[in-house]
Image: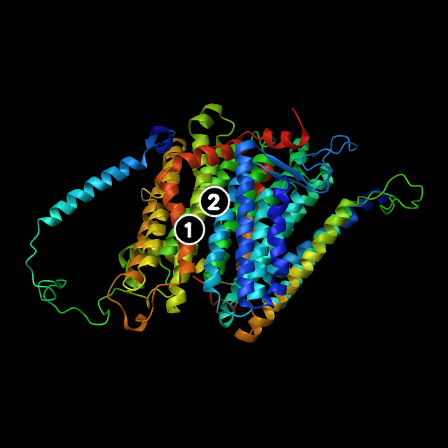
Amino acid sequence: MNTVWTMTTGSGTWNPLLWLLAFAVALIVSLFIRSKGRKDYKVDSGQDMPFISGNDEPKNGGGHIPASNMYWGFLESMKGYYKRVVPLHTGVVTDYLIWFVGVMALTLVIGLMA
Amino acid sequence: MRHLPALLVATPLFAAFFMPLIGRAGQTARSLWVLLASVATSTVGLLLAWKVFTTGTVLYVFGAAAAGQALPMDSGGIPIRIIFEVDALSALMVVIASLSSLAVTLYSLVADSKSSGQDGFYSMLFLLVAGIFGMVSTGDLFNFFVFLEITSLSGAALVAFRIDKGVAVEAGLKYALLSTVGALSILIAIGILFGQYNALNIATLAARLQFTMLDKVALALLIVPLAMKCGAVPMHFWTPDAYSTAPSSITALLVVSSQASLYGLFRILFSLYGDVLQFSWLTFGWFLIILGVLSMFVGVTMAILQKDVKRLMAYHAVSQTGYMLLGVGVGLAVLGNREALDAYGRTAMAGGLFHILNHAMYKGLLFLTAGAIFYRTGTRNLNKLGGLGHTMPWTMVFFMIGALAIAGIPPFNGFASKLLIYESVFRFNPFLSIIAMIVSILTLASFVKVFHSMFMGAPKAEYAEAREVPKSMLIGMGFLAVIVVVTGLMPRPFIDHMITPAVNALVDRSDYIVAILGGK
Amino acid sequence: MIRLLWAFPFITVAILAVIGIDAMLFKRNLIKILMGLGLLEAAVNLFLVATGYRQSGIAPIFTNAPDAPQMVLPTVQALTLTSIVIGVATLAMMLSFTMIIYKKYGTVDSQQIRKLKG
């Protein structure tokens, strides 16, 4: 079991089977807790629907957060970084070539000094 | 069996050149020919890799009396023909390319079945496959250049295939222009090296190389274009453009061709220049590490703000390439330090090389799922998609497997290779490992965003008729998903039999030279 | 001065390459960028052939070869032929891309062909 299933890095080991075992134990515990719930609820009534602080569920996917708004907090806090990096991705092919030649020049300097 | 390396390149070339002829007999004939050729190519690749992993480096000399005879008897000990030298690292790349090309072909038999110009499409797909196989198995520097150009040209033509109101052609032009300039730089370097040492064979050059000023110039001219071709920041700008506008199956194959350029980079740095760089291992190691860290961070931060799902995945491809550069860069930096190399250098390189295999598998899977969504809904805009989990459950499961694998969540294969990289890079320099972990978390964040936008939520009215994709596409995706899961649950056999021989092939550089030039 | 005549092809290579790279990096018209690429390819081919030249060498053909101390190197000539063919294919493909871009976008100004950005 050990030689096939255990992966040794330089400073530790990783055994996926033990992870699966732990996952199975956690799954059994959570299913056990779930089974202690009540089964006498009325299907498709107010007891079954998602609770949005008493409001109605928006129709036709209205409550779905669009992708561009999902990580607003992260994007807002990194605005200084993005203000500098995003304009560099201009989309003009000559800029791509200038970057390539620039890195080539830098590497030539490093290579000739090494 | 003796001619396997030649068949590796000959089979896809034969299939490519006969494609238009057989295509005249109808769509079914063409699909059968594509399927047959793809299965044959992958079988040849896997047989060759199995032969290399069990018996050692395989040599094939084109045009010699005996296939393994590298030194003709009347040449005075100089190998004079084009030689394919398939050692353990080449065999690893051949395995990756075989598995990917089989999955991609199964997928595109259905996904591209309604588009026109399929003769040209499949011809160029097989030319791309032939170019990738040639790039990773050749032992001759000019032959590497020729296969690199074949790969770039067919890749660019395939990127521009669906003209798509000109956007795809713009991306194809950018890819072709950058690739051609890079390949011309490589050709100048080959000319410089040939002019000095009168040899084109990598092993012969490695034996004859002294580190003159011209050799340093040639080294810079060789590694920068190859780093550009794999999408290292700051030369990565073509990657999101080309990957997002290409047909999805082609994007999965373009990822493999970027890994083949990464293979070329490692071959140049370790096997060709390995011995002469003795006092500069640290410098070039840090060069790779800085490229890797920049790629990781810029790739993932640009990915979080994308609206186009394939452009987002392309930025993630840039980011994951940074992991490979980081792992192998740490290995290169400690190559001179014997204890550090045995303690964590080899593990870092094993992590980097294992990540190449894992990345090709899960990134291919992710691009194929994005293509499946595009096939059914006709859009790649994340702001417009939603609620597809109800009607496309299999695609959702495959996407989940790919997304958890790329984020490095156990028990999938991304975790195994990232753990190797984290632990070994930590012992080299803790900050690099911390940056790698932060990038992993941001990767998970952006894929949670994609999963929520595409699959979660109530079903939308405009996608009501989006059923599950046809079986052939599911089989292609399932093939890669099975490999992702199996490699994650049992990493040890893959590491012991495929990755560790590849690491030894890079670190013990003399084996490459001895295989051709004889004993030392 | 005559002894330094060997450097003349390589100086030409450098001048051609610099003009080609300048055209590719700083011109706005796509056709001029491709012309710069053609110049760069010509420079690389000239470099390869010039590498093989040997002073007072003859063509590398054994049949009826005149008496001469040495032949020029044939390998680089093979490399150059391959490179010329690759260059022809690449330029043809990129010119056809430019034609399609002009038909769809209406312009060949590289600063305006940037629908893929960010």
**Which residue is nearer to you in this view: C25 or C118?**
C118
Residue C20 vs B383, above or below: the answer is above
Specify whether B515 is left or right of B255. Answer: right
Residue under pointer 1: B479
Specify whether A34 is left or right of B491. Answer: left
Q: How many residues crowd mark 2 within 10 Å: few (<14), some (14–19), many (20+)?
A: many
- Evaluate whether residue B182 shows in this view: no
Residue under pointer 2: B291
Specify whether B416 is left or right of B193. Answer: left
Q: Position of residue C72 (x, y in %)?
A: 83, 44
Cα–Cα gap, marks 2 and 1:
32 Å
Tell me the quarter of the picture where residue A26 sits: top left
Q: Amino acid at mark 2?
A: Leu
The subunit letter for the residue under badge 1 reads B
Quarter of the image where the N terminus of chain B is located: top right
Q: Amino acid at mark 1?
A: Phe
Give SS at disc 1: helix
How many numbered discs, if any? 2
**Which residue is nearer to you in this view: B220 or C23?**
B220
Specify whether B297 is left or right of B218. Answer: left
Residue A112 vs B453, above or below: the answer is above
The circle on residue A54 is none
